[in-house]
Image: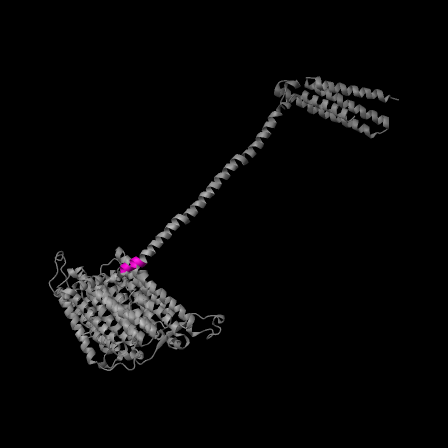
Amino acid sequence: MMPVRLVLLLSHALFALGVYGVLTRRHAIGLLLSIELILNAAALNFVLFSRAFGHVEAQAFALFIIALAACEAVVGLAIVIGLARHAQTVFADEVELLKG
Amino acid sequence: MMPALLWIPLLPLAAFALLITCGRRLGRFSAVVTVAALAGSGGATLALAEPVFHGHRLSVQWAWLSLPAALTAGQAGAGDPRWALGLSVDGLSWLMLAVVTGVGTMIALYSTGYMRGDPRYSRFFAYLALFCASMLGLVLADHFLLLYACWELVGLCSYLLISFWFERPSAAAAGRKAFITTRIGDAGLLAGILWLAWAGGTLRFEEFAALHGTLSGGRLTAISLLIFLGAVGKSAQVPLHVWLPDAMEGPTPVSALIHAATMVAAGVYLVARTLPLFTPESLRVVLAVGLVTHLAAGTVALTMTDIKRVLAYSTISQLGLMMTALGLGAQALAMFHLTTHACFKALLFLGAGSVIHATHEQELGRLGGLRRAMPWTAAVFLVAAVSMSGVFPLSGFWSKDAILLAARHGGPPWLLGALLAGAVVTTAYIFRLYLRCFHGAAASQEGRASHPPHESPMVMVLPMAVLALGAAAVGLAGSPWLHHPLLHLLGVTEPHGGIEAPILLWSTVAAAAGLWLAWSVGVRRARPLPAFLRPLGTRLYTLAAHKYYVDEWYQRVVIGPCLSAARGLSRFDLRIIDGAVNGAGRAGWAVARWKERFDRLVVDRLVNGTAAAVRATGAGLRWIQTGIVHQYLLVVVVAVVLVSLVLK
């Protein structure tokens, strides 16, 4: 019997860690990694509640999230490479292409 | 096969159509066309002579208008013959036909010589043909409408021919004057015709006699006087006579044909034709107008110094004599005098034209002694003058004496005296003209050496000779010697028999007195009046020489006020109407300017202001969009945290 509270704590910690990373990492790849943490926190929650309430369907969402994360990593890395070629940098705070 | 009747007006009309369309190409040949057409009409007239002299009446008719039954309800019914127009010949119109075609042919022939070298040679003959066609139509018409149409056409031709040399301002003015003056009479005629159609219900000449039963006397008098007004205009009777002397601005053959022999006689013909409509009261008016015209124009003719003007006033005077005869109810005598007058007056005009052609001069003071240079012209002129004076046994004698006889038997006693005085005046002015032109010393010769007066060419002398024959002999057709065939033709069954010795005596005395006056006063400038009467004589002379101031009176009473009224109206137009139009334009412009300012200041500013507000808002909010990812993410996180706190 897995203590639900404990696992919830873990997943929250992972999520907070991810948000912190997103807000503080300057490196674009660091940003991607932090987003990976957030996604995994969400997947962990799905799995946890699936076990706790006996809903097997929720585990399918965990699989979706893994697939989604893979896609996201592909697109994110492509953007990073494009950014490096275009702006000669991979630091997110040195690029302000979206400035109005 | 068309009846001969139709050929009479159609031949000259065809000639006109041909000449007006391709006259320029025909050149000299155009004269031949007109002369041939007129001669053809004359031939057709002669062909009709036999039945007409037997008292038959020939006619051709066609339905012109058939009124719908609703309009004719209560009257004779639809398909009513009263609106069938047609041509018809009886004695009266046959005589006019003979005069128009006979004199017309001679004058057209004469014009081939007179108009030689004129730049509008064929145009002249086209107008002449149109004139003859409409005059013949006028004479042949058996319906008042057709007559009126031809009447106006004749007036138009008169206008065109008077101002034929329209380069001269005086000719153009004369044409205008003639047209406008006769138009006044025509308005009366038209009113008379309309009234007659409305009140009497018929416009056919043959039905006029029956109207006496159906129409009241007063109404008939008014209608006949309106018709007479048309005749006054066309026949140049007082007070509408002023146009005829000025009409002498036209070429002389025109004066001879239109303004002496035929067109001006149309008024006499009209009155003779409609005489059944005239009541005793209106006949009295006709008589008075005719007599006043006869005497007044005769005395003016005594004082004129222009050959053609003398003849013009003489024509007015003789037309007055015809009107006098009509006023006596003697329709046949008026037409008889019309016929003889056409011959001798056309001849006088042609003679005058011959003189003008030879000398380029028409002032009596600068003419004289032409008898030797122009023997033929002098001879025919003398014949015409003698005939006009009424000397036994030339044409003028028979017709004038017949009128004197009628005046003696049918008129008040003073009428005979007045007519005899008129005869004295007639002889006096015509012999004054003859003697001063052809006798006496040849007048001042300066400029004459370059072209001495010469006899006119054969083509001009020949028609004059033919007309001289007519002037001498036509009257015999109405004389008791031949038992009045002409008067029988005109429907007089019982003409006054024989020559009355007193009338013969009186008219001979009148002619002699006139001749003596012409010789002593007109040529030798004697002063027959005793000294105490001379101032009066001089005053009378001045009065006549100024044509009784009729023109001046018209100028002051009619033309002046008309002109000032027109000027006033023109000023009204310029000031008020134009002012209103321009004011409307200016007001529209002002409104447009005001609206333009509104557009610029209000509408445009609203639109631009909206755009500026949007732009300012965008500029104000620009700083939010930094483009730095971390800031965006921070906003997202803070917002989520806040939202979750609120929704807790």
Name the spot of residue B363 as percent of width and height, x first.
Answer: 18, 60
**Which percent across, then down, holds residue B501?**
19, 80
Q: Main secondary structure of the magenta part?
A: helix
The answer to whether B251 is drawn above or below residue B225 in the figure is above
Tell me, yes or no, whether the highlighted magenta stretch contains residue B512. no
Q: Nearer the viewer, residue B56 or B632?
A: B56
Q: Is residue B447 left or right of residue B216?
A: left
> Does residue A58 appear to the left or right of B56 in the view shown?
right
Position in image of residue B588 (x %, y %)? 47, 43
Q: Residue at x 48, y 70 (%)?
A: B71
In depth, the one of A32 and B176 nearer the eye is: B176
Quadrant of the drawing holding the N terminus of chain B: bottom left
Residue B109 visible within the image: no
The residue range painted magenta reads B551-557
Furthest-front residue in this view: B532
Give the quarter of the image for residue B25: bottom left
Q: In the image as oriented, which residue stretches furthest toward the right?
A: A1
Task: Say if B344 sits above or below A8 in the image.
Answer: below
Quarter the C terminus of chain B occupies: top right
From the viewer's side, name the closer residue of B368 and B534: B534
**Quarter of image, res B223:** bottom left
Q: Position of residue B277 (x, y in %)?
A: 36, 74
Which of the two residues, B454 or A59, is positioned nearer the viewer here? B454
